[in-house]
Amino acid sequence: MDKPMVRIGHLSSWYGRGRDRRQVLRDVSLTLAPGEALGIVGESGSGKSTLAKCVLGMVADVSGTLEVGDPRPQMVFQDPYGSLNPAKTVGWILEEPLRAAGVRDRAERRRRVREFLPLVGLEEGHLARKPAQLSGGQRQRVAIAAALIQGSRLIVLDEPVSALDVTLQAQILQLLADLKEELGLSYLFISHDLAVVYQLCGRVAVMTGGEIVEEGDVDQIYDHPRHPYTKKLLAASLALD
Amino acid sequence: MRQKNWYLTIGVILTVCMLSFIAVGFFWTPFEPSAMDGGARNAAPSAAHPFGCDAYGRDILSRTLEGAGSTLAIALAVLAVGAVCGLAVGALCGYYGGPADALIMRLCDAVAAFPSVLLALVVLAVTGPGKYNVIGALGVLFIPSFARLVRGEFLKYRERDFVKSARLMGVHSLRIMFVHILPNTWPTLLSGLTIGFNNAVLAEASMSYLGIGVRPTEPSLGYMLKDAQGVLFTLPWCTVFPGLVAILLILGVGLVGEGLRERMGAAA
């Protein structure tokens, strides 16, 4: 078996300081294999976003062990209106990760950006546009391309489709699934929506109150949920469908 | 639907007119500004002297041209000092926050609590009058207002996802501040700059009027007003024309600022 992409052992995390210090993660353990997509499901405040931030190295107050197999994991944010710099063109936004990675040659950067466009379903005509001139789906494609272009293999997806309407959701989920196969990516997929997780992930962990209460294959969790919280989540998601 | 932005249109036209007027003064004036013509003393506006002459027979149009140029130069220099330093301070405070930010902002509050002209008076009482002392004193006193404006903008943007995303990609903090965030703050900064420019023109004029601004050998609009206040009713053209130029310049730039703000509001 390969070395896991993420191995988290007995991870706890706190926000705040002194008397306001509040525990947001309690003894969380999980592993993510290379090429795997793991869904983290829970309502807001369950600690799922904090878990993602820990993996990205954005949380300081933690205890436990955390091994991440990618030196620079990236994140795709929920709101494609906020995750792209409104003052810049798509071309600039896609070149910037390469600039940060030390690719000095402009022609080389442009070549790599142009090579990447078809992978995410964008065209060269989009490069000169600003984010405000793109649709929500196109923006999320740009955000995905920006996250991948440095060559990161571990991607945290923070509710990447919940700001999109249903047909676009399906398109973006398909794109994410294709990219995973083509580039051998590992996903940590944060969502409150079990139905969306079911489409993309093989395994799912259910979180509430900062703990993982249930973990397993999506089919098993869907068909035979054991924890009452999972049953509640499932019922809510089915009621919506 | 897009409404015509009259503030911006009129402001730009007015500003361009005033700037062209002042630009002419840099290269050409009808008479030597300080040359006294004994035969033209107290002359009312005429074809030869469109703005009239003062009690020494100096051509008011020439002096207004030169004075406006010097006022403009001082205002721009003050603005440059205040805006550049304010930008640096505000960006660092807003982006990093923390105790240093709190301390610097209280300091800015303390400076901003006094009218800037009053503080500049104190500084100039120590350093003596002169163009560069005025620029230095006013420039430093203009820092707090810019710093606060910039800080507010950076505070707003540092939590945006595109900034977080840049951090994850390993972009250097200074680059995030000045390449990623700064371009988004231009509309706000620009309207802040127009207000700052007007304040600088007014502050320079007030200080020269009080006699502690520029030296008599380097007249500005404020100095001309002070110089002519004794003959306000007998030779009104000595004050009306320099005053009018100052007012139109401020009005033009002010309208541009207002128009920019309006356009931002429409875009948001």
Image: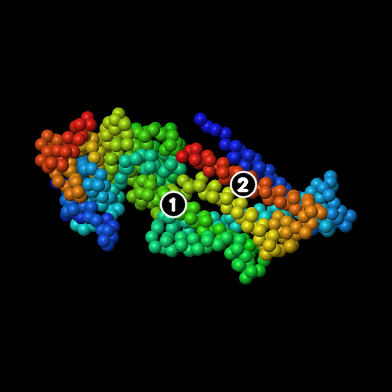
Q: Chain of mark 2?
A: B
Dot 2: element? helix
Which of the two discs, 2 and 1, sits closer to the camera?
Answer: 2
Q: Looking at the image, which residue is at 67% across and 57% down? A: B205
Q: CA distance from mark 2 to mark 1?
A: 25 Å
Q: Is residue B128 above or below residue A158?
A: below
For label 1, the crowd category at 10 Å Cα-Cα, with few meaning under 14, some 14 to 19 and many 20 or more, is many
Q: Looking at the image, which residue is at 86% across and 55% down? A: B41
Q: Looking at the image, which residue is at 49% across and 40% down? A: B265
Q: Residue furthest bottom?
A: B126
Q: At which x and y percent is residue B219?
A: 72, 58
The colour mode here is: rainbow
Amino acid type indicated by mark 2: Val
Q: At which x and y percent is residue A57?
A: 28, 53
Q: Is residue A108 visible?
A: no
Q: Is residue A170 visible?
A: yes
Q: Is residue B237 above or below residue A118?
A: below
The answer to whether the residue labelled 2 contacts the one labelled 1, judged by CB atoms less than 8 Å apart, is: no
Q: Is residue A182 left or right of residue B93?
A: left
**Label number found at residue B253:** 2
**Label number found at residue A236:** none
Amino acid type indicated by mark 1: Phe
Q: At which x and y percent is residue A103?
A: 39, 48
- Which comes before the other along the chain, label 2 or label 1? 1
Do the residues indicated by labels 2 and 1 lie within the same chain of the protein? yes
For label 2, the crowd category at 10 Å Cα-Cα, with few meaning under 14, some 14 to 19 and many 20 or more, is many
Residue carrying label 1: B154
Q: Residue furthest front?
A: B233
